[in-house]
Image: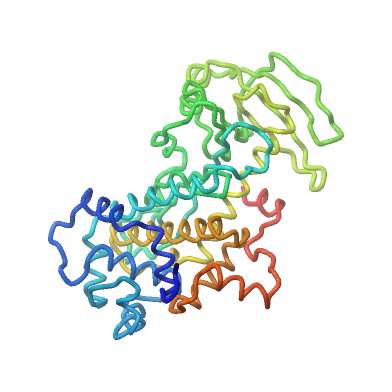
Amino acid sequence: MNSGRLIFTQITDLIHREQFNRCMLLHPMPRASKSMTARDQFLAMAFAQMTFRESLRDIEACLDGCAHCYAMGIRGKIVRTNLAYANENRDWRVYEALGQILIRKARRLYVEDSNGLDIEEMVYALDASTIDLCFSMFPWARFRQTKAAVKLHTMIDLRGSIPVFMSITDGSVHDVNVLDQIVFESGSIYVMDRGYVDFARLYRIHQAGAFFVTRAKSNMAFYVSESRPVDKAIGLRCDQSAGLKTTKSKRDYPEKLRRIRFVDLETGKSLVFITNHFGLPAIMIARIYKSRWHIELFFKWIKQNLRIKAFYGTSVNAVKTQIWIAICVYLMVACLNKIHGFGENLSRILQVLSVNVFQKTPIHQLFMDYCTNFDEPQLPNQLTFNEFLTGQ
């Protein structure tokens, strides 16, 4: 079926042309660029992500006069000035809408996968990652007095580590503010670190019929209304029903909380969790918090394998465009992983695809030939759980 078609084209075929056109119509460009359409821009930037191009000049040099441009779907001429203009002026929300389409496709593919916890509830992990920038070149991305940064606020579905929510802000926006933008699903579990502890916002999750699992701050004032027996042999130290003591916190969260203290038997580190879920065993709450580790791996993967730490443009629009196209590439690789059954090593899949973008072999055959000669390597982006805890 894919005989004679480039690997690059087989990847981008995951995005139907009509779906792409609808995204363009949602956010039209003020002054259309005849020499570079939104599709040309996307294909050029996706090519840059897959092959890790260093600059707009590097993209132009690779594609200028390339005999494969037409076969890649590129109809215009890729010139760095045109690409810079498109990144600066074409609304980044076109690629956000495209990313949402790919998110829905990826979630359908991974719907039967396990989240590794053996529970029926959907589990989402929420966190933010900071990308440092040069203050003189990105003055709009305020972080500190002499430092600039953007922040990727992301929530992933643990089934396949698919990002289901992403917001890009400047570095000065606190992590907890993103809770105001999320629509919570009744019956789902949201796991986050203690930077998201804001009792008014946590109570909004509770009122939505959803559950949260997070770590308690060391200065949390509470009283214990009930204690349940725990198995200390597996690291549990207490499982309590607790109420908040201060006037403000009681007003913000008038219901009881579940407080669980757990000690890691390997490191001796003590962790105190708070949740509004009283139906699961205490050890399962600890396991759910440990599953937040997957979002750290997600951030590490996209920073190591995609071009999101150095940018081709300096405006807000250019930065958001580049990040969203990078997320689209991640989602396309994740979809290919599931469609063709390659395994879970997305780093290796992207590596194989990037060095064979101009080959005309069907993707599945390419990997069959490649895996015949090489053993499956271990994921290069693994973190130990101790490193994960140290980073809290």
The percent position of residue 188, horizontal first and vertical second, equals 54, 31
**130 displayed left or right of 101:** right
> Image check: 189 left or right of 228?
left
Give the residue displayed 39% in from the left and 71% down from the top: 47
Q: Residue at x 31, y 59 (%)?
A: 139
Q: Nearer the viewer, residue 69 or 298?
A: 69
Residue at the image position 38 percent from the left and 67 percent from the top: 46
Percent position (x, y) of residue 72?
35, 73
Vertical side of 39 occupied by 172: above or below: above
Indicate the quadrant containing the N terminus: top left, top right, bottom left or bottom right: bottom left
Rendering coords of residue 185 (x, y %): 48, 30
In the displayed orientation, state which residue is furthest to the left: 31
The answer to which quarter of the image holds residue 123 is top right
Q: Position of residue 109 (x, y in %)?
A: 52, 48
Residue placed at 15% from the left, 68% from the top? 34
In the displayed structure, 151 sits above or below 308; it is: above
Q: Nearer the viewer, residue 342 or 224?
A: 342
